[in-house]
Amino acid sequence: MEAEVRKPVKFAGLEVPPDLTRTNFFFLYLCALIIGIILVIPTLIQPGFLQETIKVSDDIFGLTNGFMQNISQIATLIFVGVVGILSDKVGRKILACIGFGMIIVFFYLLGMSVEIAAALNIPEGITSTICAYLSFAPSRAADFTEFAPQLIVAYAIRFFLGLGMILCYPQFITMVADYTYEKDRGKGMAMNGIMIGLASILVFSIVAQIGKRVGINLSSLFFSAVGLFGLLCTLLFLKDRMPEKKREDKKSLREILSIVRKSTTLKASYLCTLVGRADIGIMTSYLVVWAVSVGTSPEYGMTTAEATQKGALSIIVMGVFSLIAFPVVGVLLDKWGRIQTVIMSFLIGGIGVLLIAVSPSPFSFFTYFAVVLVSFGIAGANAGANTLASHAAPKDIVGSILGGLNTMQPIGLIFFYFACGYLFDVFGAAWAFAIKGAANIILVVWLLMVKKEIISEIDNAPENTKG
């Protein structure tokens, strides 16, 4: 009598390997949702925190807000490559747990920045000069004097909070590669993207109301509790599924980049991350800034709060349609083709950003239609780039390759924040969006030029994480 053939166990269409369970998969994506919420929270609370807690004056609010926005990107740029290498050496789970632990501590400390500055008796003179230089306003040190001690504490805490996030966030992407078979990897990465998109919607629709009701300082306790929940979920319900083969000589970041340069597929994934992942930051930042600048004009006569709220509608629309775009992109990655799907996504997204550049108003239906197209570009930049990288990476250094991939994100964000911000101030909103859309289209042209080479590499690549 023939042995009964084991029917594959599946979770949301993904085949579950024999050494894992549906519970592992459920909590993997729940943890992705939790870290997604934590990643978005600073964008939401930071303006109110700087105004209400730190007491930053209005005339330099933009400078301090801009630098604090980039602190997390600086932490990412410094550490994400190292974190990827450590991920292959010590495991994904332990780094995620350490990261959640840091998030718990530093979210709590962020709400106590003023008290910490007072307890340490930080002097105003030298700190005002440091804060002025950090905020790219060295000639205005005197303007920082009154609040410099608590601001420099907040800057330091925000840096370590960003470090905690970068210890967590990449691990759940790498674990998707560890958990899934090659045939399901596109859908697996897309589901990770869905969780990040859903997190943004939850933060702007629900978490924002909590902040309004309890205030910034008490909110920090709630955010620490979210980190604690993530720590418990990771500790109790996730398991590492590391490759059995280990290399004795761990690769340095320079060696990782050397491997990337030899693979057109890996180069494509890195460039997609460099250019494409900036879309979320640029859209969320400059759509709101554009809405405020236009909404408060005599033509519309809105208050700043009203303009901000109305401008946020386009971001919510983008978030909702991202939830639709990610599963579509995931299926296409597995069924139609990796690079074909990435090219299509970037083309649609690039057209969307260019349409925003010619839109008559941030509140027009034209803009809302354009951000729907942008959501497909975001899905391609995230799920597509992650899938390409995890497919082409050597089996025993997937974490290192994805760590290098994530290094591209802050580089792209810092560049486009600066370029778009300069063009926005000097030439207007249209130019800020035009340069970003043009970058997407240029990348599409390059991808079309190397498409055949990438398809050949993908077809000849061994399956690197199955079994």
Image: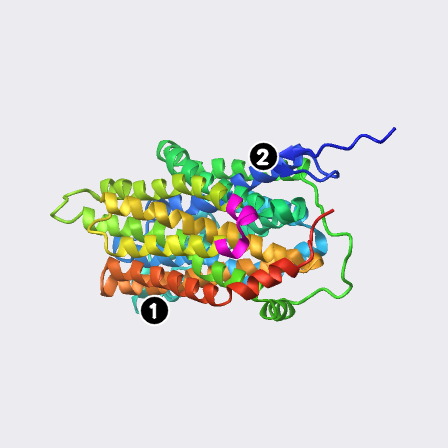
Q: Position of residue 112 (x, y in %)?
A: 46, 44
Q: Is residue 92 magenta?
A: no
Q: Position of residue 393 (x, y in %)?
A: 64, 59
For badge 2, the amino acid type reads Ala
Q: Secondary structure at mark 1?
A: helix
For badge 1, the amino acid type reads Pro
Is residue 380 in sight in this rendering? yes
Q: Position of residue 80 (x, y in %)?
A: 57, 59
Query: Between disc 1 and disc 2, whose residue precedes?
Result: 2
In which quadrant of the rendered view does residue 430 lie? bottom left
Give the residue at x 56% y 63%. Answer: 454
Give the residue at x 63% y 39%. Answer: 234
> In this view, which residue lies farthest toward the right?
1
Compared with 226, 402 (above or below) is below
Is residue 79 in sight in this rendering? no
Compared with 173, 25 (above or below) is above
Eye-nearest disc, 1 or 2: 2
Question: Pointer 1 and pointer 2: residues touching (CB < 8 Å)?
Answer: no
Q: Which residue is mark 1?
A: 138
> In this view, which residue lies farthest toward the front?
1
Q: Secondary structure at mark 2?
A: loop
The colour scheme of the drawn protein is rainbow
Q: Which residue is mark 2?
A: 12
Give the residue at x 36% y 55%. Answer: 282
**Magenta stretch bounds:** 331-340
Front residue of 274/216: it is: 274
Compared with 267, 184 (above or below) is above
- State the quadrant of the N terminus: top right
Q: Is residue 337 magenta?
A: yes
Q: Which secondary structure class fits the magenta region best?
A: helix
Q: Is residue 332 left or right of residue 20?
A: left
